[in-house]
Amino acid sequence: MNTLEQHKKQVNDALLFTGKVGFTNAENLQLVANRKRRGFPTQLVNLGLLLSRKMAGGNLIFGLSKMGADTIGVKQFDIHKLTLGRVEHALTAQAVTLVAIKDLGVVDYEFEPQNISRDTRPDVIWIFDDGSKLYIEIELSAKSISDGDMDRFFMKLLSRNTLVVFRDQTLYSRYIMQTRKYIETGIPEWTRINGKWVKFDAFVKFDRDEWDNIEFQLYKEGVSTKLSLIFEAIGFGY
Protein backbone atom coordinates (compact mmCIF):
# COMPACT_ATOMS: atom_id res chain seq x y z
CA MET A 1 0.00 0.00 0.00
CA ASN A 2 1.52 3.32 -1.08
CA THR A 3 1.46 6.46 1.05
CA LEU A 4 -1.61 7.95 -0.65
CA GLU A 5 -3.64 4.76 -0.30
CA GLN A 6 -2.58 4.42 3.31
CA HIS A 7 -3.68 8.00 4.04
CA LYS A 8 -7.07 7.42 2.39
CA LYS A 9 -7.56 4.30 4.49
CA GLN A 10 -6.62 6.16 7.67
CA VAL A 11 -9.09 8.93 6.87
CA ASN A 12 -11.86 6.47 6.05
CA ASP A 13 -11.21 4.43 9.24
CA ALA A 14 -11.31 7.60 11.32
CA LEU A 15 -14.57 8.77 9.76
CA LEU A 16 -16.24 5.37 10.14
CA PHE A 17 -15.23 5.16 13.79
CA THR A 18 -16.38 8.71 14.55
CA GLY A 19 -19.67 8.02 12.78
CA LYS A 20 -20.19 4.92 14.89
CA VAL A 21 -19.40 6.51 18.26
CA GLY A 22 -20.74 10.04 17.60
CA PHE A 23 -17.74 11.89 19.01
CA THR A 24 -14.18 11.15 20.06
CA ASN A 25 -10.84 12.77 20.91
CA ALA A 26 -7.45 13.14 19.23
CA GLU A 27 -5.87 10.21 21.06
CA ASN A 28 -8.58 7.80 19.96
CA LEU A 29 -8.51 9.06 16.37
CA GLN A 30 -4.77 8.40 16.26
CA LEU A 31 -5.37 4.89 17.63
CA VAL A 32 -7.98 4.19 14.95
CA ALA A 33 -5.67 5.36 12.17
CA ASN A 34 -2.57 3.80 13.77
CA ARG A 35 -0.90 7.21 13.64
CA LYS A 36 1.69 8.00 16.30
CA ARG A 37 2.40 11.56 15.24
CA ARG A 38 0.01 14.28 16.34
CA GLY A 39 -1.86 16.47 13.91
CA PHE A 40 -4.08 13.90 12.21
CA PRO A 41 -7.36 15.19 13.74
CA THR A 42 -6.42 18.75 12.77
CA GLN A 43 -5.87 17.57 9.19
CA LEU A 44 -9.39 16.12 9.14
CA VAL A 45 -10.80 19.40 10.46
CA ASN A 46 -8.89 21.35 7.80
CA LEU A 47 -10.28 19.00 5.15
CA GLY A 48 -13.78 19.87 6.34
CA LEU A 49 -14.51 16.30 7.46
CA LEU A 50 -14.56 16.86 11.23
CA LEU A 51 -15.71 19.57 13.62
CA SER A 52 -14.08 20.23 16.99
CA ARG A 53 -15.35 21.52 20.33
CA LYS A 54 -13.41 22.47 23.45
CA MET A 55 -15.11 21.17 26.59
CA ALA A 56 -14.80 22.46 30.15
CA GLY A 57 -11.41 21.53 31.53
CA GLY A 58 -9.77 21.95 28.13
CA ASN A 59 -10.73 18.60 26.59
CA LEU A 60 -11.03 18.82 22.82
CA ILE A 61 -13.55 16.52 21.15
CA PHE A 62 -14.29 15.85 17.49
CA GLY A 63 -17.40 14.90 15.56
CA LEU A 64 -18.32 14.53 11.90
CA SER A 65 -19.06 17.64 9.89
CA LYS A 66 -21.94 17.56 7.43
CA MET A 67 -19.41 16.75 4.71
CA GLY A 68 -17.84 14.00 6.80
CA ALA A 69 -21.23 12.46 7.60
CA ASP A 70 -22.27 12.56 3.94
CA THR A 71 -18.95 10.98 2.92
CA ILE A 72 -19.69 7.78 4.85
CA GLY A 73 -23.48 7.95 4.59
CA VAL A 74 -24.48 8.51 8.23
CA LYS A 75 -26.50 11.11 10.13
CA GLN A 76 -24.44 13.91 11.65
CA PHE A 77 -24.20 13.87 15.46
CA ASP A 78 -24.44 17.25 17.25
CA ILE A 79 -21.36 17.44 19.48
CA HIS A 80 -22.59 20.71 21.00
CA LYS A 81 -25.31 18.88 22.96
CA LEU A 82 -22.84 16.77 24.94
CA THR A 83 -22.37 17.01 28.70
CA LEU A 84 -18.93 16.72 30.33
CA GLY A 85 -19.81 13.59 32.34
CA ARG A 86 -20.92 11.69 29.28
CA VAL A 87 -17.78 12.66 27.37
CA GLU A 88 -15.25 11.30 29.88
CA HIS A 89 -17.17 8.05 30.25
CA ALA A 90 -17.52 7.51 26.50
CA LEU A 91 -13.91 8.38 25.66
CA THR A 92 -12.67 5.82 28.18
CA ALA A 93 -14.97 3.17 26.67
CA GLN A 94 -13.68 4.02 23.21
CA ALA A 95 -10.02 3.86 24.25
CA VAL A 96 -10.23 0.45 25.93
CA THR A 97 -12.18 -0.87 22.94
CA LEU A 98 -9.57 0.30 20.43
CA VAL A 99 -6.81 -1.34 22.46
CA ALA A 100 -8.87 -4.55 22.63
CA ILE A 101 -9.26 -4.58 18.84
CA LYS A 102 -5.48 -4.45 18.50
CA ASP A 103 -4.45 -6.70 21.39
CA LEU A 104 -7.36 -9.07 22.08
CA GLY A 105 -8.78 -9.78 18.64
CA VAL A 106 -12.10 -7.99 19.06
CA VAL A 107 -13.75 -8.01 15.62
CA ASP A 108 -16.83 -5.90 16.35
CA TYR A 109 -18.29 -3.79 19.13
CA GLU A 110 -21.45 -1.94 20.12
CA PHE A 111 -21.63 1.02 22.47
CA GLU A 112 -24.64 1.26 24.82
CA PRO A 113 -26.76 -1.27 22.87
CA GLN A 114 -30.31 0.06 22.81
CA ASN A 115 -31.86 -3.39 22.33
CA ILE A 116 -30.92 -4.21 25.96
CA SER A 117 -33.03 -2.77 28.79
CA ARG A 118 -31.60 0.20 30.68
CA ASP A 119 -31.27 -1.80 33.93
CA THR A 120 -28.98 -4.38 32.32
CA ARG A 121 -27.43 -2.38 29.47
CA PRO A 122 -23.60 -2.49 29.37
CA ASP A 123 -21.42 0.41 28.26
CA VAL A 124 -19.93 -1.68 25.45
CA ILE A 125 -20.21 -5.20 24.05
CA TRP A 126 -17.07 -6.71 22.52
CA ILE A 127 -17.58 -9.45 19.94
CA PHE A 128 -14.87 -11.97 19.05
CA ASP A 129 -14.41 -13.98 15.86
CA ASP A 130 -15.90 -17.11 17.45
CA GLY A 131 -19.09 -15.19 18.22
CA SER A 132 -18.43 -14.94 21.96
CA LYS A 133 -19.12 -11.65 23.74
CA LEU A 134 -17.61 -9.71 26.60
CA TYR A 135 -19.65 -7.01 28.35
CA ILE A 136 -17.77 -3.88 29.36
CA GLU A 137 -18.60 -1.50 32.21
CA ILE A 138 -16.76 1.80 32.77
CA GLU A 139 -16.82 2.92 36.42
CA LEU A 140 -15.77 6.52 37.02
CA SER A 141 -17.72 7.07 40.24
CA ALA A 142 -19.01 4.80 42.98
CA LYS A 143 -22.47 3.29 42.86
CA SER A 144 -24.71 4.15 45.82
CA ILE A 145 -25.05 1.48 48.49
CA SER A 146 -27.98 2.90 50.47
CA ASP A 147 -30.50 2.66 47.63
CA GLY A 148 -29.27 -0.70 46.33
CA ASP A 149 -27.60 0.63 43.21
CA MET A 150 -24.36 -1.20 44.07
CA ASP A 151 -26.25 -4.43 44.84
CA ARG A 152 -28.04 -4.39 41.51
CA PHE A 153 -24.85 -3.48 39.65
CA PHE A 154 -23.10 -6.59 40.95
CA MET A 155 -26.13 -8.73 40.11
CA LYS A 156 -25.85 -7.43 36.54
CA LEU A 157 -22.13 -8.23 36.44
CA LEU A 158 -22.72 -11.78 37.62
CA SER A 159 -25.25 -12.47 34.87
CA ARG A 160 -22.63 -12.58 32.09
CA ASN A 161 -18.92 -12.34 31.22
CA THR A 162 -17.96 -8.83 32.25
CA LEU A 163 -14.90 -6.59 32.36
CA VAL A 164 -15.16 -3.55 34.65
CA VAL A 165 -12.69 -0.75 33.93
CA PHE A 166 -11.73 1.84 36.57
CA ARG A 167 -9.66 4.99 36.16
CA ASP A 168 -9.15 5.57 39.88
CA GLN A 169 -7.12 3.33 42.21
CA THR A 170 -9.22 4.24 45.25
CA LEU A 171 -12.45 3.34 43.48
CA TYR A 172 -10.91 0.10 42.21
CA SER A 173 -9.90 -0.86 45.76
CA ARG A 174 -13.34 0.07 47.09
CA TYR A 175 -15.03 -2.30 44.64
CA ILE A 176 -12.60 -5.07 45.58
CA MET A 177 -13.65 -4.64 49.22
CA GLN A 178 -17.31 -4.67 48.21
CA THR A 179 -16.70 -7.89 46.29
CA ARG A 180 -15.35 -9.53 49.45
CA LYS A 181 -18.46 -8.50 51.34
CA TYR A 182 -20.79 -9.91 48.70
CA ILE A 183 -18.89 -13.20 48.51
CA GLU A 184 -19.01 -13.61 52.27
CA THR A 185 -22.60 -12.51 52.97
CA GLY A 186 -24.36 -12.62 49.62
CA ILE A 187 -26.03 -9.82 47.65
CA PRO A 188 -29.33 -8.36 48.91
CA GLU A 189 -32.24 -9.26 46.66
CA TRP A 190 -34.18 -6.42 45.00
CA THR A 191 -37.32 -6.53 42.87
CA ARG A 192 -38.96 -3.74 40.90
CA ILE A 193 -42.59 -3.30 41.98
CA ASN A 194 -44.81 -0.65 40.38
CA GLY A 195 -41.75 1.10 38.98
CA LYS A 196 -39.85 1.20 42.29
CA TRP A 197 -37.05 -1.01 43.58
CA VAL A 198 -38.00 -2.91 46.74
CA LYS A 199 -35.43 -4.68 48.94
CA PHE A 200 -36.17 -8.10 50.43
CA ASP A 201 -34.60 -9.82 53.41
CA ALA A 202 -33.13 -12.57 51.22
CA PHE A 203 -29.49 -12.67 50.14
CA VAL A 204 -28.22 -14.31 46.95
CA LYS A 205 -24.87 -16.11 47.01
CA PHE A 206 -22.82 -17.14 43.99
CA ASP A 207 -20.20 -19.83 43.50
CA ARG A 208 -16.63 -19.55 42.25
CA ASP A 209 -17.47 -20.15 38.58
CA GLU A 210 -19.91 -17.28 38.55
CA TRP A 211 -17.40 -14.89 40.15
CA ASP A 212 -14.87 -16.08 37.56
CA ASN A 213 -17.00 -14.35 34.91
CA ILE A 214 -15.96 -10.93 36.23
CA GLU A 215 -12.63 -9.12 35.93
CA PHE A 216 -11.73 -5.69 37.33
CA GLN A 217 -9.11 -3.67 35.46
CA LEU A 218 -7.34 -0.42 36.31
CA TYR A 219 -7.18 1.73 33.18
CA LYS A 220 -3.67 2.07 31.67
CA GLU A 221 -2.03 0.62 34.78
CA GLY A 222 -1.73 -3.04 33.77
CA VAL A 223 -3.51 -4.04 36.98
CA SER A 224 -6.40 -6.49 36.90
CA THR A 225 -8.16 -8.92 39.22
CA LYS A 226 -10.35 -11.91 38.44
CA LEU A 227 -13.01 -11.93 41.16
CA SER A 228 -12.76 -15.71 41.45
CA LEU A 229 -9.32 -15.12 43.02
CA ILE A 230 -11.00 -13.18 45.81
CA PHE A 231 -13.48 -16.03 46.24
CA GLU A 232 -10.58 -18.48 46.58
CA ALA A 233 -8.69 -16.26 49.03
CA ILE A 234 -11.73 -16.05 51.27
CA GLY A 235 -12.09 -19.82 51.08
CA PHE A 236 -8.50 -20.16 52.35
CA GLY A 237 -9.14 -17.70 55.17
CA TYR A 238 -7.45 -14.64 53.69
Image: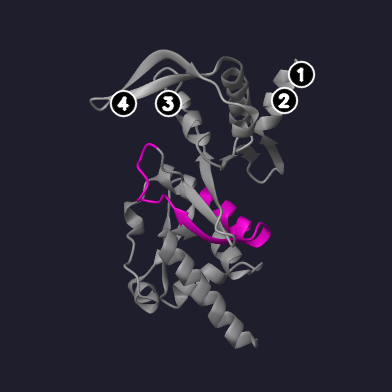
**Percent from the top left, x then y, of residue 110?**
46, 56
In the drawing, what numbered circle is on residue 192?
4
Residue at position x 36%, y 70% from top?
Answer: 65
Q: Earlier in the sequence, mark 3 or mark 4?
A: 3
**Percent from the top left, x then y, of residue 207?**
61, 26
Query: Is 173 left or right of 124, judged from the image as shown?
Result: right
**Mark 1 or 3: the one toward you:** 1
**Percent from the top left, x then y, of residue 115?**
35, 50
In the drawing, what numbered circle is on residue 222?
none
The residue singled out by tag 3 in the image is 149
The residue singled out by tag 1 in the image is 236
Q: Earlier in the sequence, mark 2 or mark 4?
A: 4
Q: Amino acid at mark 4?
A: Arg
The residue singled out by tag 2 in the image is 232
State the quadrant of the N terminus.
Answer: bottom right
**Is residue 108 within the magenta segment?**
yes
